[in-house]
Image (cartoon, grey):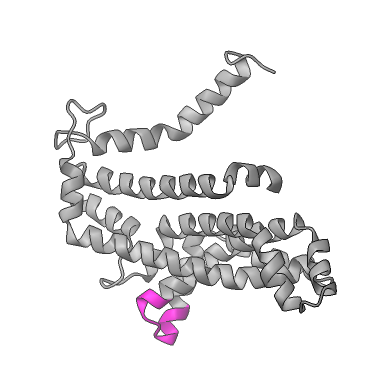
Amino acid sequence: MRAPGSPLACVNAAIYLFILAPVIVVVALAFSGTESLAFPPSSLSLRWFAKFLSQAELMSALGTSLALAALSCAISLSLGGLAAFGLARGRFRGRGAVLNLLQTPLMVPQLVLAMGFLEYFAALDVPSFPALLLGHTVITLPYVVRTMVAGLASVDMLAEHAAVSLGATRLQAIRQVTLPMLTNGMVAAVLFSFIVSFENLPLALFLSDPSSVTLPLQIYSYIQWVFDPTVAAASTVQVLVVVLLVFAAERAIGISRFMGVMR
């Protein structure tokens, strides 16, 4: 065991600090008592959170982002779960090609995807929110498939076979035996896809209209015209939502242990 003050521990601490430094600065600015974005703040106040809560455009964008993330999670979990079952349990030609195909949204720059979606949905005259929902489902689906395939790989199929041998149908065995053992994988998949959807900006830049503006896009638009810590407060709310989700997942299933199994 390495001592806490070992060189490797110091390097790890420096790396974490480097990664988290922008977040720390933004959170600190959100509590600034002055109107300037100066770090460190000379005084502390909650006035910018109050202003954020009073801004109808920002609150509406927050609601849109939450709804979009929740719906895209539900759709991608349903579709990705079915695909993961077929890929994990099936033995067919082209299985690897199908898995790679489902991972392609991770390999294509999201701005390129957004431009393609814009042309496609404009040709079909799809409204903004459904277009955003479909786009977010596409970019979250790979996370669900990858996580669920990993979860299924760690599930012992003997329990499912035992349920079938005792008279259960295959569907009953999957619903009552396999799915409960996949709870950790499903929660992790929802966590990943929610975060990816909730913080996505490129798709919103191309697919949003005034009736369906997401919080990242509203923050981007706000900072072009108003330069005060309100935008830091809005960003801190985004960070808080993600941290609460991770904390809830850790308390519910021990997400860190599940990630260790995946590796």
Magenta span: 120-130
Q: Residue at x 40, y 83 (%)?
A: 126
Q: Is residue 121 above or below residue 84?
A: below
Q: Residue at x 17, y 47 (%)?
A: 50
Name the residue rendered at 47%, 61% in the picture. 111
Q: Is residue 117 left or right of residue 32?
A: right
Which quadrant does the C terminus fall into?
top right
Q: Position of residue 253 (x, y in %)?
A: 58, 49
163 lies above or below 241: below
Instruction: Find out whether residue 92 is within the magenta segment.
Output: no
From the top left corner, tell me how far across and down residue 184 is, in percent.
Answer: 62, 54
At a point 70% along the width and 46% down the height, the residue shown is 261
Residue 259, percent from left and from top: 64, 45
Residue 142 can be seen in this image: yes
Q: Is residue 205 visible?
A: no
Q: Is residue 129 part of the magenta span, yes or no?
A: yes
What predominant SS class does the magenta segment belong to? Answer: helix
